[in-house]
Amino acid sequence: MQSCSLLSLATAVPPHVVEQHEAKARAREAFGGKKALFDRLSGVFDNAGIAKRHIVAPQDWYLAEHGWHDRNSLYLKAAEDLFVEAASTAIEKAGMAPDQIDGVVAVSTTGIATPSLEARAAPRVGFRDDIRRVPLFGLGCAGGVNGLATAARMATSEPGTNWLFVTVETCSISIRLDSADPAAIVATALFGDGAAAAVVTSGEHSLARITGASEKLFPDTLRIMGWDVEDPGLAVVFDRAIPPFIEQHLAKTVDEMCVKLGVDFEDVDRLCCHPGGVKVIDAIETALKLNQGELNIEREVLRDFGNMSAPTVLFVLERLLARGLPDRVLMTAFGPGFTCAGLMLEAA
């Protein structure tokens, strides 16, 4: 990849907020006949490192029964609203008008939209009628890094074009109170909703320069993370092996990525990681022998927003930019596949 400029970054969250202690109390009530299972696993609410989360519906909505139609209808409305807010803010921050955007990469995995989200949002954002559209599905938590990398590749392949990247995830819609799967309880303790957007272009950089991207797909790992499609809605796949898998494989994976990106890991000033959970952050620190506190911003974002899947790593980057981006930053995120995505940023 030729270097590409990151011109702006914006985030958005839905209006409804749930405090973690409140989520625990209401979830215990809602799991009904599975109280013994819930009580056995309820410590995840206390140990998740989360204070509050933003969700796309009032809390009572989650206590009622919903099938595919209800869940996806909420996704379409909420995701479009979040898309418009994040995209419009990113374009404005870039000092552009919507008709200056030549293409859009849209990442979302928590609902089905055909036409896709960027087409639905186009009239409200103000896109031109000849805008290039690249909707991406199935990337999960890795979508924030992979989607930004895809937008950067598109921008550098056509010098002078401006590309918008938007990722929207409404993870809370997939919360399943009918399930006896322990992963469903973990999801109830972790999931929040949010969106992020960025504008990239070739040429001189503004906020930062994107210098390269890499990805590692691990064989025979399809059941580590993802969604199962079931009659009431999506069912989360979370394997308990995720943290130990990261501890075992991340160091070698990062070294391989750095070789492909033409740098030594020792020359990376900071990571910018997707904070999927406290145990995931701990595993990253252990695998890469990081000092205590090096991933403090990741823990802050997890505390304030929970796991929003793909947008979450962009929330970390937003805080890094606000505090002064280090000279060289490696963004990383894990997602279904099982995959690790990486992207290199250099400060302005």
Image (spheres, rainbow, N blue to C red):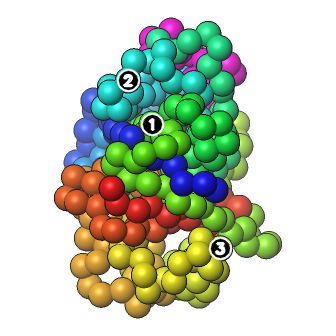
At label 1, the amino acid type is Val
**Outermost residue to the right:** 220
At label 3, the amino acid type is Lys
- Residue where numbered disc 1 is placed: 199
At label 2, the amino acid type is Met
Mark 3 vs 1, N-terminal side:
1
Residue that appears at 50% across and 9% down: 123
* Numbered range of the magenta stretch: 110-125
Membership of 123 in magenta stretch:
yes
- Residue where numbered disc 2 is placed: 96
Mark 3 vs 2, N-terminal side:
2
Q: Which of 3 and 137 is in front in this view?
A: 3
Does the residue at mark 3 contact the one at mark 2 (Cβ under 8 Å)?
no
> Do we see residue 149 in this rendering?
yes
Q: Which of 108 and 228 is in front in this view?
A: 108
Q: Distance of mark 1 from mark 2, alpha carbons? A: 9 Å
- Residue where numbered disc 3 is placed: 260
Query: Is 293 rendered above or below residue 158?
Result: below
Q: Can you tell which quarter of the image residue 248 is in?
A: bottom right
Residue that appears at 26% across and 43% down: 18
Membership of 323 in magenta stretch:
no
Query: Is 49 rendered above or below residue 137?
Result: below
Query: Is 139 rendered above or below residue 164?
Result: below
Q: Distance of mark 3 from mark 1, alpha carbons? A: 25 Å
Instruction: Report x, y in % for residue 316.
Output: 34, 57
Mark 1 vs 2, N-terminal side:
2
> Do we see residue 77 in this rendering?
no
Q: Can you tell which quarter of the image residue 64 is in?
A: top left
Helix, strand or loop under label 1: strand
Residue that appears at 36% across and 86% down: 290
Does the residue at mark 3 contact the one at mark 1 (Cβ under 8 Å)?
no
Instruction: Report x, y in % for residue 33.
Output: 48, 52
